[in-house]
Image (spheres, coloured by chain):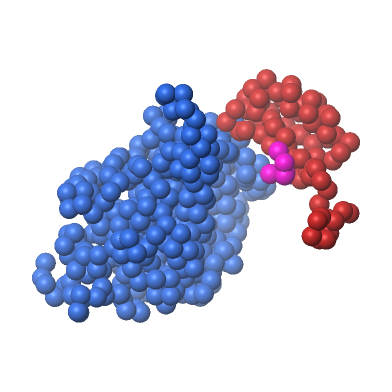
Chain colours: A red, B blue
Amino acid sequence: MTANRDGETLHQPRFPEPGLRVNPIACEAHGVCIELLPELISADPWGYPVIRPGPVPLHLQSLARRAVAACPTLALMLTSPPP
Amino acid sequence: MTARDVAVPSEGRPLAPAPGELRLIVRDQPLSLAEHIARYGPLPAGQLVSHALIAEVERSGLTGRGGGAFPAGRKIRAVAEASMRPRTIRASGGSVAKGSVAKGSVVVANGSESEPASSKDSVLLSLAPHLVLDGIALCASAVGASRAYLCVGHRTAAIARSVTEAAAERVRTGLDSVPVEVTTTADGYLSGQENALISALNGNAPLPTFVPPRAAQRGVHRRPTLVLNVETLAHIALIARFGSHWFRASGTPGAPGSALVTITGAVERPGVREIPLGTGLGEVLQRSGLSQPAQAVLTGGYFGTWLPLPAALAVPVSDEGMRAAGAALGPGVLAVLPESACGLAETARIASFLAAGSAGQCGPCRNGLPALADALNWIAFGQPNQDIVGWVEQLSGLVTGRGACHLPDGAAGLARSALRVFAADVQAHLTAGPCARAGGPPILPLPAGGSR
């Protein structure tokens, strides 16, 4: 917990945890993200990614960045704050 | 058309519609520009500067009447701020200017009304075009727009002609500084969706786009764009004249003002009505004349929610009231289902229409909506088993929130509410097959080719 110049207490961490979001128009269900990040992303009956809602926990953030970078259609993105 | 149809302001003062009086549609003939000004008074030009209008609309509590029910004042403010934001522009000569308004923003009046059961926007545009055009002029001035578009539905070519004439008359008389370009929205359930409209005005396919960027940041011609429903703009024309206090004299504190609703289905006098928001559903339907015993009402359009009758008769007709009942007012469609019809058959037909209306851009919607429609058709017309109800619920969960627009969410909400409201019928269909009513003629209107 930190305080700003006006003495207000800031409960939010300085860098809020990011969330994952998919651009459903760009997504073509290659499934790379599902392979790379099964902790947060699962497949629907048609192979499209279903993302667990909420922020990406710290210990999964580097894996999430890898999944974002590996998406062939650049459909997966990290957003801050979470969608 | 007689003189006594038009209220004449005394001592040159505009006449604010009194409490209980209709505000937007004062008679069943179009108001000419002269009659419009005689009825409502001229626009308070110059007196109501940008920030004053925005503040007044914010105080009024007006929400978008196109279905989203987003606070209109906040929407206008976002576009005004985006277009005032200092940004660096490089002129052709190479000089760099840091201006307040780098480029004009754009106002889009949405009268597309692609919802098949709704006709309130086309009725408003044909009977009170100058209220809508007033709203466009006010908003254009409030957000610093250099261009304005009025998009009308493809079903109503005559309206495109009459509003084009109305807009031209205003330019001739020097009323509008920003000319209004009238365009016809493409056919298709989604073509009136805000981002689909912007996409079409940019010369692209009339399909929803991924957000961000938001229209307020980058819309038509990459400029900050204000998209408001035509009824919302008409209310703004009255708020600018008579103030937020007057606006709030109708409706409830949580849902102020009046609204146009389209009542269809099993009523004696279907059509468009203006009601104070918060009026009980029973009273609204009673005024349209319930022609026969009704079992349910579909609220919010085909993207909407079934509410059971008579249980829902006390539900206030407002976004606030409907939300509390698990529904939404949306664009103001109330479709009454008689006892003689099968709610599952109606739902299945609408689900097929929605599946056919999918833009097909997003995988979960492209696959999920046909699957959902198939399952609902199976329940309505086939030999269903118990598993299929679970499959409908699973599919509804799977498609919700997974499209670029809210079409999948709407289809899922419709399906879930049908399983809830017609639960007894579902059990009957599961045990004995389709009921006799399922073979009856469709009650709710669907465009040709939209149903199976």
Q: Nearer the viewer, residue B46 or A53?
A: B46
Q: Residue at x 72, y 35 (%)?
A: A78
Work out whether B365 lies above or below B298.
Answer: above
Q: Nearer the viewer, residue B375 or B369?
A: B369
Horizontal side of residue A28 vs B218, given as left or right: right
Instruction: Residue B168: give x, y in percent of width and height.
Output: 19, 47
- For the C terminus of chain B, the quadrant is top left
Work out whether B104 lies above or below B442.
Answer: above
Residue span colored magenta: A79-83
Q: Main secondary structure of the magenta part?
A: loop
Horizontal side of residue B5 vs B356, given as left or right: left
Q: Nearer the viewer, residue A45 or A60?
A: A60
Horizontal side of residue B104 vs B164, given as left or right: right
Work out whether B241 lies above or below B447.
Answer: below
Q: Residue at x 42, y 62 (%)?
A: B53
Horizontal side of residue B428 vs B101, given as left or right: right
Instruction: Residue B194: give x, y in percent of width and height.
Output: 46, 44
Q: Nearer the viewer, residue B398 or A39?
A: A39
Residue B388 visible at all: no
Instruction: Residue B284: give x, y in percent of width and height.
Output: 40, 72
- Does the magenta-highlighted stretch encompass residue B226? no
Residue B314 visible at all: yes
User: Which quarter of the picture shows residue A77?
Assistant: top right
Instruction: Residue B121: give x, y in percent of width and height.
Output: 33, 54
User: Which quarter of the picture shows residue B182?
Assistant: top left
Q: Residue at x 84, y 40 (%)?
A: A57
- For the N terminus of chain B, the quadrant is bottom left
> How many marks can you see?
0
Q: Residue at x 43, y 38 (%)?
A: B103
